[in-house]
Each structure stands twice: as C-alpha cells, then as structure tokens.
Image (cartoon, helix red, strand yellow):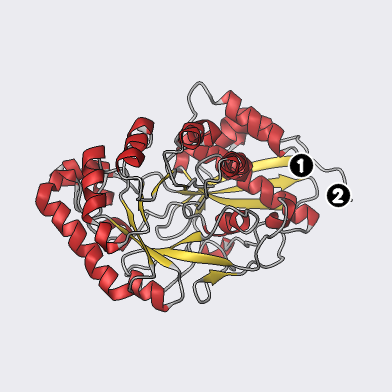
Amino acid sequence: MMKKLTITDVRAFVLEQAGSGGDYHDREQGHWLVDTLIATPMSAYPEYKQSRTSFGINVMKSIVVEVEASDGTIGISAGQGGAPACYMIEQHFRRFIVGQDPRSLNRIWDQMFRASRYYGGKGVPLWAISAVDLALWDLLGLLRQEPVYQMIGGAVRNEIELYCTGIRPDVAKEAGFIGGKMPLPHSPADRREGLNANVKQFREMRDRVGPDFHLMADCWMALDVPYAVELAYALQEIGMYWLEEVLHPDDFDGYKLLKERVPWMRWTTGEHEYTRYGFRKLIESRSVDILQPDVMWCGGLTELLRISAMAAAYDIPVVPHGSGAYSYHFVVTQPHCPFCEYLNTSTDCLSFPPVFGNMFENEILPKNGKIKLTDDPGWGLKLNRKGLELNRVSPAAKRQGE
C-alpha cells in the first residue's frame, strides 16, 4: 500500500535549445518539419508560405514540468507553451497542486480547468494543464512502482504497430512501419497547378510503396470543403488511407459536409481540438472516421481517457497525434486504438531518432516499425538533466516574495 504523501512543489522550465522537447517544430533551418513546402492556413500569404518558422510555428518553445512529493520523488513531463505556460503553472495552477494527495488526479485537473475557463479552454492553457497532468501520472507511477499503462487498465496487445510521419514513407516501409503520412505541399491558394502537384507527389510515392501500404496526407488545417472534395476525388485512384485535418478545427459542419459528399474517404482530425467538449460534436455527428487527440495538448491523459471513452461508445477509432511514450502508454490499453503515430524528427527522415530529441536518456525507439513497452514505472522516461538548458522563468517564489 502506498504511504500517505502530499505534493510539496511544482516547477516549470523552458527548454531553451532547439531540437529537443515537446515542441516538435522548434528546429534548426533546413529541417523537414519547418522548411519543407507544407500547406498551412498561412499559405495564402506568399511571404509566409515556404517555411513554417516564418510565421512563428516555433516560438512557443518546449517546457519541462516537475511535480515533487513529500518523500522527494519527482514526476516529470515534456510539454509546450514556453514562458506563458510556465507562468500559468507556477503562478496560477500551483495553488491546486501543492498540498494535494498525488492520487487526486481528477480533482487537480478539474480545478485547473474550471479556474482557467475565463481565459482558457483551448491553446496554451490546455497545454499547461496537459503538462501538469502528465507529470502527475509519472509521479503516481513512480510512487506505485507501476508503468502508467498498467495503472489505466493494462495492455490489450503485446506491441504497438506504428505509422511514420515524415517525407519518406518509402524509407518507413523498409523499416517495418505499417504506413506513412506526408504533408500536403499545396493549398487552395496555389489553384489548379497546386492541386495537380499534390496529386503528382502522392502518386509517385504510391508507386514507391506499393498498393498495400497505408499512405496518408496531413493537410494541417489548410483547405476548405470544395478543395478537399476535389482533392479526395483526384486522389481516389491512388488509394489514400486517410486525409487528415483538412479544415479549420472549429468547422464541425464542414466535416459533416465532407462525409456526405465523399463517404468512401477516411476523414480524420483532432490534433488541434481540446477536451471532451471539443470532441463531443465530432463524435456525436459521426462526421469523422478517426479521432486524433494529442495527449500533450488536449488536457493530458486524464482528459484523453474521457475522450476515448466517448469515442468507444460510437465505435470510432482513436489514433493519437504524436507525443511518443505518452501516446504509446495510452494506445496499448485501448481496444479501439488500432495503431499509433511515430513522428520522425530526423532532418531528412532517413533515420528514426527519439521523438523528443535528447530530452530523455532512455526514450524507447521503434524496432521493425513497432513499439514494445517496458515495465519501468511511470512513463519510463529519465530526464537528461546534464544535457538540457532549463530556464525556470517564473518561479512561484518571486510572486510570494520568499
């Protein structure tokens, strides 16, 4: 039995160096994630079209959260949101964390969410809540000496099949992944020429990977309904496994129209949706075939489990967006999660490095396109403290005058 403990401190740090941590887009120039031509909502503006860093996709920075118990045990998590998220955690959410029983996950989550409703609900406030929640799950696993996946019901499969997101699905296929997802290069702003170029890129990749490999397109909120419909029909002969996040995340009616007009296509979304309230309409309308919540953004594992339960009641598969080990521990416990994403963070997608760079000493890596989790407690991740430049930009002590 776990002895009675309390949480004594919560600390939030900005991770200063590029290429590590929860902000996948904080990369050096030339990396495929930022300097490949990728359709975005900003593609309508020529000066912000070529590189996603040009419109600031990398400005929010990675963060590290620590939650410490009264026996000195420290739970950690990766997150995103930079100094603003750290400020919220240390100056606002701290009051709901310190002094609590580490097992009070639902209470802490609910109080953080309710208290931030007047300025939150989506975006950075939910990123901050997610990071705290993931650190709490890590702490609880360390105290119980159990991996997170065992604490939420145990594994329903021995290993997790993965698809790989990057610019080289052909290389991913050779490495044993079941599928590959490429970014769509052109948006409606590029008119017919861009549409033809999109089709050409995916047709050439289909020729490389063959007919039985799952090939997906990430459209990153860049399209509208008419263009998405035309694109789907143009790609029909290629046999795309899905088209992802084609619309603005709040365009619920648009997704309903897409399913009506192109019922044979798998439409997926959810990466930029938040909490069960955001997912409820997508689920109830059955307008999306697969949901893709990000556990580091949507509200953490505590909220992802609620979203997943809602989806399961409608037999809608859940394939989480990114997030490495945080997603793996979730997916391995859920019968309606058929596989998981591996985000390739190498510069050219010719190798398969740790998702979080050098942030952790022991991040688990794919083998033959699969992940097999260990019995290490918590998330099974050990922070690489010596190799990271961590900046505690808004410690609570400054506010309290200690």
| Left or right position of 369 against 231 | right
Compared to residue 261, the image places residue 151 above or below, namely below
- The amino acid at mark 1 is Arg
Q: Which residue is mark 2?
A: 2
> Where's residue 127, x and y in %?
50, 40
SS state under label 1: loop
Q: Residues within 10 Å of mark 2 (few under 14, many from 20)?
A: few
Q: In terms of depth relative to the viewer, which is nearer, 366 or 243?
A: 243
> Where's residue 261, x and y in %?
29, 40
- Number of numbered labels in the structure image: 2
The outermost residue toward the bottom is: 174
Identify the mark nearer the N-term, 2 or 1.
2
Identified at 47% across, 55% down, the residue is 322
The outermost residue toward the top is: 118
Q: How far, Cα to Cα, is label 2 from label 1?
A: 10 Å
Q: Residues within 10 Å of mark 1 (few under 14, many from 20)?
A: some
Q: Which residue is mark 1?
A: 103
Label 2 with label 1: CB-CB less than 8 Å: yes
Compared to residue 394, the image places residue 53 above or below, namely below
